[in-house]
Image (cartoon, rainbow, N blue to C red):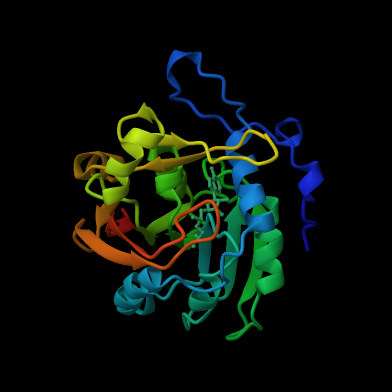
Amino acid sequence: MPMRIKDEELTAANMPAVGISSLPNDEAVPPAALRLFWERFWLRGKGRYQLQANTLELLTEVRPHLVSLAPQRALDVGCGDGRNIDFLQGIPSLRVLHGLDFSLNAVAKAARNMPANHNAVSVSFEVAECTRLPFSDESIDLVLACDLLNHLDGCDDACHECARVLRPGGLLIANPLSESDPGAEELRDSSMLIGSNTFLVRPEDPDGRYTAYIMRFATKSELVSTFAEGFDFLLPLIERERFDPPHGYPFRQEAHTHIYWQVVCQRV
Ligand SMILES: C[S@@+](CC[C@H](N)C(=O)[O-])C[C@H]1O[C@@H](n2cnc3c(N)ncnc32)[C@H](O)[C@@H]1O
């Protein structure tokens, strides 16, 4: 099981580089700040180990497609504390399940949270960048990317990487936030615009350590162009509303609504 990184060890200096490619004006953001944010979030966060109701709603609807696709090997990319793993383990055909996250603390938490295996699924965890997946071409049947694409400064690289590892016919399920999400308007005043509908949010850090996270709101046309290469939409690319419970610090402490894109597409 991976070791946690302790709080005092979390400094920008000991994090491997994670780039933000689109910062304007040479704004000085340590490249490690993004990963540092998530390391601290998973170390300290009181986030519950529980499948989010909205994810469950989407996955439950997609389940008939999952059952008929009969995936044997699945990847939960940006798996966080592993909250989606139990659902994935319940797919009857599944034999191998990988959780992957660039946060070591997330993966350590996910490994600790693992429910007992059922259906003899072999579960393992990887610490890696979603743009450099440690899997060979066409080796995965199902990729789940929940609440991940909206925390990247662009989703092309991650989606191309998912396309590379998916076998033809394999499924990608994702839920990027939409430009019509109310959060896009709220962040306009309080955070830094670093790209088209992409914000860098710098939460107050009581210890003065620099951390930041990205919130990105996608347009339909950019998702169509991202997925045009390598994918067909299995379900329509539509906006859906979801109700999120209060999140742990530094995310919102009150229940709120998001508008996200339903992305259920199949590798051609
Ligand atoms: C909002 S959480 C979502 C967790 C989980 N997928 C869920 O549905 O609740 C986003 C996760 O993506 C991870 N993450 C962010 N950027 C990443 C990257 N570039 N590569 C891999 N994981 C990343 C974070 O560490 C965090 O665990």
Between 181 and 136, the one lying in front of the other is 181
Q: Position of residue 177 (x, y in %)?
A: 32, 51
- The residue at the far front in this view is 206
Identify the residue shown where x is 57% and y is 75%.
95
Q: Where does residue 50 sit, x and y in percent of width and height?
A: 52, 74
Residue extending farthest top:
25
- Lateral position of residue 142 relative to residue 134, left or right: left
**Residue 74 vertical position relative to residue 194 in the rendered view, above or below:** below
Image quarter in which the N terminus is found:
bottom right
Q: Nearer the viewer, residue 63 or 268?
A: 63
- Judge whether 2 appears above or below 189 on screen: below
For image coordinates 60% across by 43% down, the residue present is: 37
Q: Could you tell me residue 21's position as x and y percent?
A: 48, 25
Q: Residue at x 32, y 35 (%)?
A: 188
In this rendered view, identify the residue nearer to me: 166 or 253. Answer: 253
Q: Is residue 113 visible?
A: yes
Residue visible at 49% across and 61% down? 247
Using the rendered image of the protein, determine whether residue 102 is visible from the camera's viewpoint. no
Q: 193 left or right of 28?
A: left
